Amino acid sequence: MSAIRVARGFTDRPKIIKFDGCYHGHADSLLVKAGSGALTCGNPDSAGVPAEFTAHTIVLPFNDRDAVEEVFAANQAQVAGIILEPVPGNAGVYLPHPGYLEFLCEITKANGSLLIFDEVMTGFRVSLGGAQEHFGITSDLSCFGKIIGGGLPVGAFGGRAEIMDVLAPDGPVYQAGTLSGNPLAMAAGIAALEQLRSGEVYKQLETSGTRLEAGLNAAAEKSGVAVTVQRIGSMFCTFFTDEPVHNLADAMQADRERFKKYFHGMLAEGVYLAPSPFEAGFISAAHSDEDIDATISAAEKVMATL
Protein backbone atom coordinates (compact mmCIF):
# COMPACT_ATOMS: atom_id res chain seq x y z
CA MET A 1 0.00 0.00 0.00
CA SER A 2 2.71 2.47 0.99
CA ALA A 3 4.97 1.58 -1.93
CA ILE A 4 2.12 2.20 -4.36
CA ARG A 5 1.34 5.52 -2.67
CA VAL A 6 4.99 6.51 -3.08
CA ALA A 7 4.97 5.43 -6.74
CA ARG A 8 1.91 7.55 -7.41
CA GLY A 9 3.35 10.47 -5.49
CA PHE A 10 6.70 10.28 -7.28
CA THR A 11 5.26 9.97 -10.80
CA ASP A 12 2.12 12.05 -10.23
CA ARG A 13 0.18 9.33 -12.06
CA PRO A 14 -2.92 7.39 -10.93
CA LYS A 15 -2.82 3.92 -12.50
CA ILE A 16 -1.16 0.73 -11.23
CA ILE A 17 -0.67 -2.53 -13.12
CA LYS A 18 -0.88 -5.79 -11.15
CA PHE A 19 -1.10 -9.40 -12.29
CA ASP A 20 -3.91 -11.84 -11.65
CA GLY A 21 -3.11 -14.27 -8.87
CA CYS A 22 -0.53 -11.99 -7.25
CA TYR A 23 -1.40 -10.97 -3.69
CA HIS A 24 -0.08 -7.70 -2.28
CA GLY A 25 -1.98 -7.32 0.95
CA HIS A 26 -5.59 -6.38 1.59
CA ALA A 27 -5.51 -2.69 0.69
CA ASP A 28 -8.72 -1.82 -1.16
CA SER A 29 -7.13 -0.98 -4.51
CA LEU A 30 -5.26 -4.30 -4.62
CA LEU A 31 -8.09 -6.76 -3.91
CA VAL A 32 -8.64 -7.47 -7.58
CA LYS A 33 -7.93 -11.04 -8.71
CA ALA A 34 -5.62 -11.15 -5.74
CA GLY A 35 -4.95 -14.83 -5.19
CA SER A 36 -4.08 -16.17 -1.73
CA GLY A 37 -6.97 -16.82 0.67
CA ALA A 38 -9.51 -14.95 -1.42
CA LEU A 39 -8.81 -17.19 -4.39
CA THR A 40 -8.99 -20.34 -2.29
CA CYS A 41 -12.46 -19.34 -1.10
CA GLY A 42 -13.60 -18.69 -4.66
CA ASN A 43 -13.91 -14.96 -3.97
CA PRO A 44 -11.02 -13.15 -5.68
CA ASP A 45 -12.49 -9.76 -4.87
CA SER A 46 -13.94 -8.57 -1.56
CA ALA A 47 -17.19 -7.10 -0.41
CA GLY A 48 -16.82 -3.65 1.11
CA VAL A 49 -14.55 -2.31 -1.64
CA PRO A 50 -16.23 0.41 -3.75
CA ALA A 51 -15.62 0.05 -7.49
CA GLU A 52 -14.10 3.54 -7.51
CA PHE A 53 -11.25 2.29 -5.30
CA THR A 54 -10.13 -0.20 -7.95
CA ALA A 55 -10.82 2.00 -10.98
CA HIS A 56 -7.10 2.76 -11.37
CA THR A 57 -5.94 -0.84 -10.91
CA ILE A 58 -5.26 -2.64 -14.19
CA VAL A 59 -5.07 -6.44 -13.90
CA LEU A 60 -3.16 -8.45 -16.51
CA PRO A 61 -2.13 -12.09 -17.00
CA PHE A 62 1.34 -12.90 -15.67
CA ASN A 63 4.03 -13.69 -18.28
CA ASP A 64 2.08 -11.89 -21.05
CA ARG A 65 4.30 -9.25 -22.68
CA ASP A 66 1.75 -8.17 -25.27
CA ALA A 67 -0.84 -7.30 -22.61
CA VAL A 68 1.65 -5.04 -20.79
CA GLU A 69 2.64 -3.28 -24.01
CA GLU A 70 -1.01 -2.71 -24.92
CA VAL A 71 -1.78 -1.14 -21.55
CA PHE A 72 1.11 1.29 -21.76
CA ALA A 73 0.13 2.22 -25.33
CA ALA A 74 -3.48 2.86 -24.26
CA ASN A 75 -2.58 4.77 -21.07
CA GLN A 76 0.13 7.19 -22.08
CA ALA A 77 1.69 8.94 -19.03
CA GLN A 78 -0.97 7.42 -16.74
CA VAL A 79 0.77 4.35 -15.28
CA ALA A 80 2.57 5.04 -12.02
CA GLY A 81 4.05 1.57 -11.84
CA ILE A 82 3.84 -2.19 -12.06
CA ILE A 83 3.67 -4.24 -8.86
CA LEU A 84 4.28 -7.99 -8.90
CA GLU A 85 5.56 -10.94 -7.01
CA PRO A 86 8.67 -11.73 -9.09
CA VAL A 87 7.84 -15.38 -8.37
CA PRO A 88 4.09 -15.57 -7.73
CA GLY A 89 3.34 -17.79 -4.75
CA ASN A 90 -0.30 -17.05 -3.99
CA ALA A 91 -1.88 -19.06 -6.80
CA GLY A 92 0.50 -21.94 -6.42
CA VAL A 93 4.05 -21.27 -7.63
CA TYR A 94 4.87 -20.27 -11.19
CA LEU A 95 8.05 -18.72 -12.53
CA PRO A 96 8.63 -15.74 -14.81
CA HIS A 97 9.51 -16.68 -18.36
CA PRO A 98 13.18 -16.06 -19.26
CA GLY A 99 13.60 -12.34 -19.95
CA TYR A 100 10.15 -11.39 -18.62
CA LEU A 101 11.38 -9.50 -15.55
CA GLU A 102 13.98 -7.74 -17.71
CA PHE A 103 11.17 -6.76 -20.08
CA LEU A 104 9.14 -5.25 -17.21
CA CYS A 105 12.20 -3.35 -16.05
CA GLU A 106 12.77 -1.94 -19.53
CA ILE A 107 9.16 -0.99 -20.30
CA THR A 108 8.64 0.80 -16.98
CA LYS A 109 11.86 2.75 -17.43
CA ALA A 110 10.96 3.67 -21.01
CA ASN A 111 7.56 4.98 -19.89
CA GLY A 112 8.65 6.85 -16.76
CA SER A 113 6.92 4.33 -14.48
CA LEU A 114 8.26 2.41 -11.48
CA LEU A 115 8.80 -1.33 -11.08
CA ILE A 116 7.73 -2.59 -7.64
CA PHE A 117 8.83 -6.03 -6.48
CA ASP A 118 6.71 -7.54 -3.74
CA GLU A 119 9.32 -9.76 -2.07
CA VAL A 120 7.25 -10.60 1.00
CA MET A 121 7.50 -14.25 -0.03
CA THR A 122 10.73 -14.39 -2.05
CA GLY A 123 12.74 -11.96 0.06
CA PHE A 124 15.58 -13.82 1.86
CA ARG A 125 13.95 -17.07 0.75
CA VAL A 126 15.19 -17.70 -2.79
CA SER A 127 18.53 -16.03 -1.94
CA LEU A 128 19.96 -13.54 0.54
CA GLY A 129 19.17 -10.80 -1.98
CA GLY A 130 15.76 -12.23 -2.76
CA ALA A 131 14.45 -12.65 -6.29
CA GLN A 132 16.36 -9.56 -7.36
CA GLU A 133 19.68 -11.24 -6.67
CA HIS A 134 18.48 -14.56 -8.10
CA PHE A 135 17.35 -13.05 -11.42
CA GLY A 136 19.82 -10.16 -11.55
CA ILE A 137 17.10 -7.49 -11.59
CA THR A 138 16.95 -4.31 -9.51
CA SER A 139 13.45 -2.94 -9.02
CA ASP A 140 12.66 0.71 -8.28
CA LEU A 141 10.83 -0.19 -5.06
CA SER A 142 10.94 -3.37 -2.97
CA CYS A 143 8.55 -4.65 -0.31
CA PHE A 144 9.42 -7.14 2.43
CA GLY A 145 7.36 -8.82 5.11
CA LYS A 146 7.93 -10.21 8.57
CA ILE A 147 11.21 -11.94 7.72
CA ILE A 148 12.66 -8.43 8.11
CA GLY A 149 11.90 -8.92 11.80
CA GLY A 150 12.92 -12.57 12.01
CA GLY A 151 9.24 -13.53 11.82
CA LEU A 152 7.93 -10.88 14.20
CA PRO A 153 5.28 -8.37 13.04
CA VAL A 154 6.94 -5.77 10.83
CA GLY A 155 7.37 -4.92 7.17
CA ALA A 156 9.59 -2.69 5.10
CA PHE A 157 9.75 -1.09 1.71
CA GLY A 158 12.52 0.90 0.07
CA GLY A 159 14.01 2.18 -3.13
CA ARG A 160 16.25 4.80 -4.66
CA ALA A 161 16.78 7.93 -2.56
CA GLU A 162 15.10 10.20 -5.11
CA ILE A 163 11.95 8.07 -4.89
CA MET A 164 11.95 7.65 -1.12
CA ASP A 165 12.51 11.39 -0.65
CA VAL A 166 8.84 11.99 -1.51
CA LEU A 167 7.96 10.53 1.92
CA ALA A 168 7.06 12.93 4.72
CA PRO A 169 8.58 14.85 6.35
CA ASP A 170 10.90 15.45 3.37
CA GLY A 171 8.12 15.11 0.82
CA PRO A 172 4.33 15.21 0.43
CA VAL A 173 3.54 11.46 0.73
CA TYR A 174 2.32 10.39 4.16
CA GLN A 175 3.19 7.01 5.69
CA ALA A 176 3.00 5.71 9.24
CA GLY A 177 3.18 2.44 11.12
CA THR A 178 2.58 1.55 14.76
CA LEU A 179 5.32 -1.08 14.68
CA SER A 180 7.85 0.94 12.68
CA GLY A 181 11.36 0.32 13.96
CA ASN A 182 10.14 -1.87 16.82
CA PRO A 183 13.34 -2.71 18.77
CA LEU A 184 12.47 -6.37 19.39
CA ALA A 185 11.61 -7.02 15.74
CA MET A 186 14.72 -5.20 14.51
CA ALA A 187 16.98 -7.21 16.83
CA ALA A 188 15.37 -10.46 15.67
CA GLY A 189 15.67 -9.43 12.03
CA ILE A 190 19.37 -8.65 12.37
CA ALA A 191 19.95 -11.99 14.09
CA ALA A 192 18.13 -13.84 11.28
CA LEU A 193 20.14 -12.07 8.57
CA GLU A 194 23.39 -12.84 10.35
CA GLN A 195 22.47 -16.53 10.27
CA LEU A 196 21.77 -16.32 6.53
CA ARG A 197 24.80 -14.28 5.52
CA SER A 198 27.23 -17.17 4.98
CA GLY A 199 24.98 -18.75 2.34
CA GLU A 200 25.14 -22.22 3.88
CA VAL A 201 21.39 -22.23 4.58
CA TYR A 202 20.64 -21.61 0.91
CA LYS A 203 22.87 -24.49 -0.18
CA GLN A 204 21.03 -26.75 2.26
CA LEU A 205 17.61 -25.55 1.06
CA GLU A 206 18.52 -26.04 -2.60
CA THR A 207 19.72 -29.56 -1.89
CA SER A 208 16.53 -30.37 0.02
CA GLY A 209 14.36 -28.75 -2.64
CA THR A 210 16.00 -30.66 -5.46
CA ARG A 211 15.58 -33.90 -3.53
CA LEU A 212 11.91 -33.26 -2.76
CA GLU A 213 11.10 -32.19 -6.32
CA ALA A 214 12.70 -35.31 -7.77
CA GLY A 215 10.95 -37.52 -5.20
CA LEU A 216 7.50 -36.06 -5.87
CA ASN A 217 7.96 -36.38 -9.63
CA ALA A 218 9.07 -39.98 -9.23
CA ALA A 219 6.08 -40.76 -7.01
CA ALA A 220 3.69 -39.27 -9.56
CA GLU A 221 5.30 -41.14 -12.45
CA LYS A 222 5.17 -44.42 -10.52
CA SER A 223 1.46 -43.99 -9.80
CA GLY A 224 0.58 -42.68 -13.25
CA VAL A 225 -0.86 -39.46 -11.85
CA ALA A 226 -0.52 -36.27 -13.90
CA VAL A 227 1.51 -33.90 -11.72
CA THR A 228 3.55 -30.78 -12.40
CA VAL A 229 5.93 -29.84 -9.60
CA GLN A 230 7.17 -26.27 -9.84
CA ARG A 231 9.98 -25.07 -7.59
CA ILE A 232 12.48 -22.32 -7.01
CA GLY A 233 14.83 -22.77 -4.07
CA SER A 234 12.73 -23.71 -1.05
CA MET A 235 9.41 -22.68 -2.63
CA PHE A 236 7.42 -25.39 -4.37
CA CYS A 237 3.96 -26.33 -5.55
CA THR A 238 2.29 -29.52 -6.76
CA PHE A 239 -0.25 -28.95 -9.52
CA PHE A 240 -2.36 -31.92 -10.57
CA THR A 241 -1.98 -31.35 -14.30
CA ASP A 242 0.38 -32.59 -17.00
CA GLU A 243 0.87 -29.06 -18.36
CA PRO A 244 3.32 -26.43 -17.08
CA VAL A 245 1.72 -23.56 -15.18
CA HIS A 246 2.71 -20.04 -16.25
CA ASN A 247 -0.10 -17.90 -14.79
CA LEU A 248 -3.38 -17.97 -12.88
CA ALA A 249 -5.41 -19.22 -15.85
CA ASP A 250 -3.11 -22.25 -16.10
CA ALA A 251 -3.29 -22.84 -12.34
CA MET A 252 -7.08 -22.83 -12.49
CA GLN A 253 -7.00 -25.71 -14.99
CA ALA A 254 -5.31 -28.05 -12.50
CA ASP A 255 -7.43 -30.74 -10.81
CA ARG A 256 -8.46 -29.20 -7.49
CA GLU A 257 -10.59 -32.15 -6.41
CA ARG A 258 -7.60 -34.43 -6.78
CA PHE A 259 -5.53 -31.99 -4.71
CA LYS A 260 -8.11 -32.22 -1.91
CA LYS A 261 -7.73 -35.99 -1.80
CA TYR A 262 -3.96 -35.61 -1.89
CA PHE A 263 -4.00 -33.08 0.95
CA HIS A 264 -6.11 -35.26 3.24
CA GLY A 265 -4.11 -38.34 2.34
CA MET A 266 -0.83 -36.59 3.15
CA LEU A 267 -2.30 -35.31 6.41
CA ALA A 268 -3.23 -38.86 7.38
CA GLU A 269 0.39 -39.83 6.73
CA GLY A 270 1.62 -37.06 9.04
CA VAL A 271 2.55 -34.47 6.42
CA TYR A 272 0.77 -31.13 6.83
CA LEU A 273 0.67 -29.26 3.51
CA ALA A 274 -1.06 -25.94 2.96
CA PRO A 275 -4.76 -26.87 2.59
CA SER A 276 -5.11 -25.15 -0.78
CA PRO A 277 -3.80 -25.81 -4.30
CA PHE A 278 -3.20 -22.06 -4.54
CA GLU A 279 -0.63 -21.82 -1.76
CA ALA A 280 3.11 -22.34 -2.00
CA GLY A 281 4.89 -24.98 0.02
CA PHE A 282 8.09 -24.08 1.84
CA ILE A 283 11.09 -26.07 2.98
CA SER A 284 12.93 -24.67 5.98
CA ALA A 285 16.36 -25.20 7.46
CA ALA A 286 14.64 -27.19 10.22
CA HIS A 287 13.61 -29.90 7.75
CA SER A 288 16.06 -32.83 7.89
CA ASP A 289 16.85 -35.37 5.19
CA GLU A 290 14.63 -37.74 7.13
CA ASP A 291 11.76 -35.27 6.90
CA ILE A 292 12.19 -34.99 3.13
CA ASP A 293 12.34 -38.76 2.76
CA ALA A 294 9.22 -39.18 4.92
CA THR A 295 7.37 -36.67 2.73
CA ILE A 296 8.38 -38.48 -0.45
CA SER A 297 7.37 -41.81 1.06
CA ALA A 298 3.97 -40.40 2.06
CA ALA A 299 3.47 -38.95 -1.42
CA GLU A 300 4.17 -42.38 -2.97
CA LYS A 301 1.49 -43.97 -0.80
CA VAL A 302 -1.10 -41.25 -1.37
CA MET A 303 -0.56 -40.80 -5.11
CA ALA A 304 -1.03 -44.54 -5.56
CA THR A 305 -4.60 -44.06 -4.30
CA LEU A 306 -5.44 -41.22 -6.68
Image (cartoon, rainbow, N blue to C red):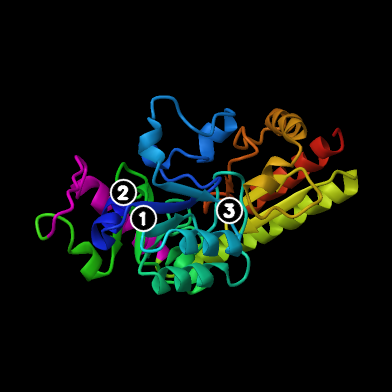
Q: Which residues are magenta?
A: 171-196
User: Which residue does the image show at 36% across and 58% down from the upper left?
Assistant: 78
Above or below, 280 relative to 28: below
Residue 118 seen: no
What is the x, y in percent for residue 271? 66, 36
Determine whether label 1 and label 2 are within 8 Å by CB. Answer: yes
**Disc 3 crowd, CA 10 A, few/some/many (<14, 14-19, 20+):** many
Q: Nearer the viewer, residue 245 or 274?
A: 245
- Amino acid type of the residue that numbered disc 1 sits on in the rendered structure: Cys
User: Which residue does the image show at 76% across and 37% down from the upper left?
Assistant: 255
Q: Which residue is the extreme one toward the top?
A: 47
- Amino acid type of the residue that numbered disc 3 sits on in the rendered structure: Met
Residue to which mark 2 is pinned? 155
User: 84 left or right of 177?
Assistant: right
Residue at disc 1, secondary structure = strand
Please check the rendered image and state whether residue 185 is part of the magenta-colored stretch, yes or no. yes
Above or below, 243 relative to 106: above
Residue at disc 2, secondary structure = loop
Residue to which mark 1 is pinned? 143
Above or below, 160 relative to 186: below
User: Which residue does the image show at 40% across and 72% down from the upper left?
Assistant: 109
Residue to which mark 3 is pinned? 235
What is the x, y in percent for residue 173? 18, 53
Q: How far apart are the alpha carbons under marks 3 and 1?
A: 18 Å
Q: Which residue is the extreme one toward the left?
A: 169
